[in-house]
């Protein structure tokens, strides 16, 4: 009997994991699992990918690591039905994350799901409900929560030392046509194109869309999901807030006229009901540094400097002297998930955290796509103009 089928997890039971998606990001996750596999008594027993070269390369790596060749398929539905599967790692393109997560939960599997959790809020809501109804242990791949420097910053913000919070200012800058990749070596016979498209409208095989999926609206909601999910996830982690109240966004394709459908320059302002504003921006046309500051009535946390100071604060509780953030060791996001599969305790980036960042990211994306201010209705779990 597998772990997923048992009520109680025995300490000696091996956790059997299938990897769904085995490309670049997945390779890192598989390597992380391999490093902690012995301590956690875990093993990769199957790989699933719609791209044959990735699938075969992953099969070879797994066989070298664990001494047994894993099962192999291009069909995630088949993989979820394999016997002796306890959990899955989902590292596919964004649009497939939540549908596969929902299917895994209904099949009784625990899951590590890469960020962002979804491409649309409808997908996130379905996955959230499936995970909750089936009592699955889910870790979302917003791994900053497991990194010591972010944990130290969270401790400062939660402590109240900054006073009343009013604003988070975060900006990420690159000068590159990010995600524009060479696709000339993608051959039709190597791709299970039908499986790749899943629930989307059917299109003729297109190696450009397959290799550079990050650039297209079919497959992702753009910069808010691809990159903003890491940082918008930190807002609940730092503050304890859950869902944003409203959001607006602006931007466009200002630099890279290369066939992409998503903005290369993006800025969103998101308001939280606790009474603070989050400014998140990303630009691909200039790499002149970035910003990550948290502003309160007593002072400012400058994450990039690793410092808390009284800059901008006032009054008797203003922080008197600047201090460096305390050092905290990094933790393994993967190990935390595997340990929680046994304990049945929520991981550090559980399904609640995943759904929270989904609301924020989708709010920003929808505000940009529609040109309207978007608000979140917690009762209906919907985004609506308002």
Image (spheres, grey):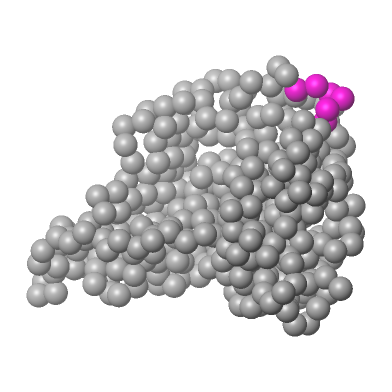
The part of the image, by quadrant, that contains residue 164 is: bottom left
Which one is nearer the viewer's eye here, 149 or 330? Answer: 330
Which one is nearer the viewer's eye here, 155 or 209? Answer: 155
Residue shown at 78% from the left, 72% from the top: 3
Which one is nearer the viewer's eye here, 179 or 344? Answer: 344
Magenta highlight on residue 190? yes
Residue shown at 72% from the left, 74% from the top: 12
Farthest-out residue, top: 184
Residue shown at 33% from the left, 41% from the top: 290
Residue shown at 61% from the left, 24% from the top: 181
The quadrant the C terminus occupies is bottom right
Left or right of residue 221, residue 51 in this image:
right
Q: In this view, does 212 lie above or below 124?
A: above
> Residue 366: x and y, percent?
59, 49
> Residue 167: x and y, percent?
32, 59
The part of the image, by quadrant, that contains residue 110 is: bottom right
For the question of whether residue 271 can be seen, the reply is: no
Q: Is residue 374 above or below residue 274?
A: above
Which region of the structure is painted magenta? Answer: 186-191
The quadrant the N terminus occupies is bottom right
């Amino acid at each position: 009997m597998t772990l997923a089928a048992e009520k109680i997890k025995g300490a000696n039971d091996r956790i059997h994991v299938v990897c769904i998606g085995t490309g670049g990001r997945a390779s890192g996750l598989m390597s992380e699992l391999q490093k902690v596999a012995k301590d956690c008594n875990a093993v990769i027993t199957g790989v699933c990918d719609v791209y044959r070269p990735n699938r075969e390369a992953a099969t070879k790596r797994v066989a070298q690591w664990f001494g047994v060749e894993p099962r192999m398929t291009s069909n995630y539905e088949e993989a979820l039905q394999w016997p002796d599967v306890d959990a899955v790692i989902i590292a596919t393109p964004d649009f497939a994350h939540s549908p596969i997560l929902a299917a895994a939960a209904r099949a009784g599997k625990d899951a590590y799901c890469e960020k962002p959790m979804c491409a649309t809020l409808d997908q996130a809501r379905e996955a959230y409900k499936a995970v909750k109804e089936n009592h699955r242990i889910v870790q979302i791949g917003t791994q900053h929560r497991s990194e010591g420097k972010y944990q130290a910053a969270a401790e400062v913000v939660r402590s109240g030392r900054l006073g009343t919070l009013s604003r988070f200012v975060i900006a990420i800058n690159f000068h590159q046509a990010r995600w524009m990749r060479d696709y000339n070596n993608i051959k039709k016979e190597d791709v299970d194109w039908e499986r790749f498209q899943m629930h989307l409208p059917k299109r003729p095989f297109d190696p450009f869309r397959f290799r550079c999926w990050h650039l297209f609206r079919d497959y992702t909601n753009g910069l808010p999901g691809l990159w903003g999910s890491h940082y918008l996830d930190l807002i609940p982690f730092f503050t304890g807030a859950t869902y944003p109240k409203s959001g607006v966004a602006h931007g466009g394709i200002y630099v890279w006229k290369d066939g992409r459908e998503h903005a290369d320059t993006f800025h969103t302002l998101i308001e939280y009901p606790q009474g603070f504003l989050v400014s998140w921006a990303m630009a691909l046309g200039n790499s002149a540094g970035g910003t990550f500051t948290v502003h309160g009535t007593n002072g400012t946390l400058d994450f990039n400097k690793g410092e808390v100071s009284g800059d901008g604060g006032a009054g008797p509780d203003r922080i008197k002297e600047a201090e460096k953030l305390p050092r905290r060791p990094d933790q393994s996001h993967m190990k935390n998930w595997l340990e929680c599969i046994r304990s049945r305790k929520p991981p550090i980036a559980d399904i609640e955290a995943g759904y929270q960042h989904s609301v924020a990211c989708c709010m920003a994306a929808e505000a940009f796509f529609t040109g309207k201010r978007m608000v979140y209705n917690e009762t209906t779990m919907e985004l609506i103009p308002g």
